[in-house]
Amino acid sequence: MKSFTVPAADAELRYHDIAGEGPALLFIHGLGCASSCDYPSIAADAALRGRRMLLVDLLGSGFSDRPTGFGYTIEDHARSIVALTEHLRLTELDLFGHSMGGAVAIMAARMLAGRLRRLVLGEPNLEPGGGFFSRRIAAMTERDYIERGHDALVQASRSEGNGIWAASLAISAPYAAHRGACSLVAGSTPSWREMLADLPQPRCVLFGEASLPNSDAEDLPRLGVNVAIIAAAGHSMAWENPAGLAQAIARDLS
């Protein structure tokens, strides 16, 4: 695993850099997750094998540092990703972002401008309001979430059979999860949907079959955004059908 010091946080962002050919494909995970957990099986799939891939753990998650003074907003994370790409001198790259990581990827795409080749998203946050878990987290004060909410959510997720997410959430900094959730609920101006629509690069949004019906799956093509469906999966597509996700990403990047 490699490490990069994020200048704005004076903290270490850690990532796997899998050697390969062509533009790098950079993975950005969702709230309470970690790319080091979610994407090794995707990167190892035959559909993507042979290309360079970067599996990044956002600050506050996975193996990356957990600075208390960092904001952990969507924009903060996006700026950290862009700083990493500049450090690696990537003149061309592709992005994949899932859920909260989708919103991060959209903001990073705007900052990368012409250096971005293609953008693929898995059920991203596009509007203010957050999702089920981010709303639940943001409904508490940061102090209450740190003192009792975080451990309670980890235990509840385990008891509900959501063990992988519970394990990733358990090692995430509670204040990072709370600040990220609040950022998702607050949204952005312009919205992430508007940012996505304005990007000139080819864009595709992936939905798990079990997440349908979803109004975005019908509306996004009207904005010039391609849509594809991952069979035998829901929102947690990387865990539920990793081969299907790898194949869909490969198709969209080709």
Image (spheres, rainbow, N blue to C red):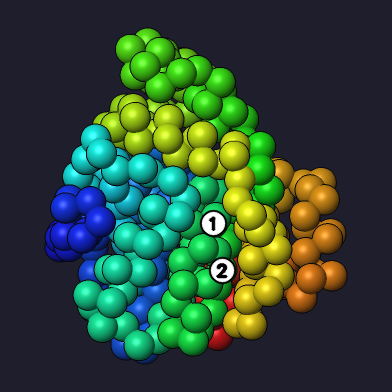
What is the spatial separation of the Cα atoms under label 2 and label 1, in whole angstroms?
A: 8 Å
Q: Which amino acid lies under the numbered mark 2 shown in the image of this protein?
A: Val
The structure residue drawn at horizontal position 28% and vertical position 77%, both measured from the top left corner, is 86
Residue 235, horizontal then vertical, whole percent: 60, 44
The structure residue drawn at horizontal position 59% and vertical position 39%, both measured from the top left corner, is 186
Res 67 → quadrant: top left
Residue 155, horizontal then vertical, whole percent: 40, 15
Picture quarter with the N terminus: bottom left
In this view of the protein, which residue sits in the foreground, 111 or 243? 111
Res 16 → quadrant: bottom left
Q: Residues within 10 Å of mark 1 (few under 14, many from 20)?
A: many
Q: Which amino acid lies under the numbered mark 1 shown in the image of this protein?
A: Gly
Q: Residues within 10 Å of mark 2 (few under 14, many from 20)?
A: many
Can residue 20 be spotted in the picture?
no
Vertical placement of 72 versus 8: above or below?
A: above
Looking at the image, residue 130 sits to the left or right of residue 179; the answer is right
Looking at the image, residue 140 sits to the left or right of residue 16; the answer is right
The structure residue drawn at horizontal position 29% and vertical position 43%, both measured from the top left corner, is 70
SS for dot 1: helix
Residue 92, horizontal then vertical, whole percent: 40, 86
SS for dot 2: strand
Res 149 → quadrant: top left
Which residue is denoted by mark 2 in the rendering? 120
Can residue 129 be spotted in the picture?
yes
Which residue is denoted by mark 1 in the rendering? 102
Vertical placement of 13 versus 246: above or below?
A: above
Quick check: marks 2 and 1 in contact, CB under 8 Å?
no
Callout in the foreground (2, 1): 1
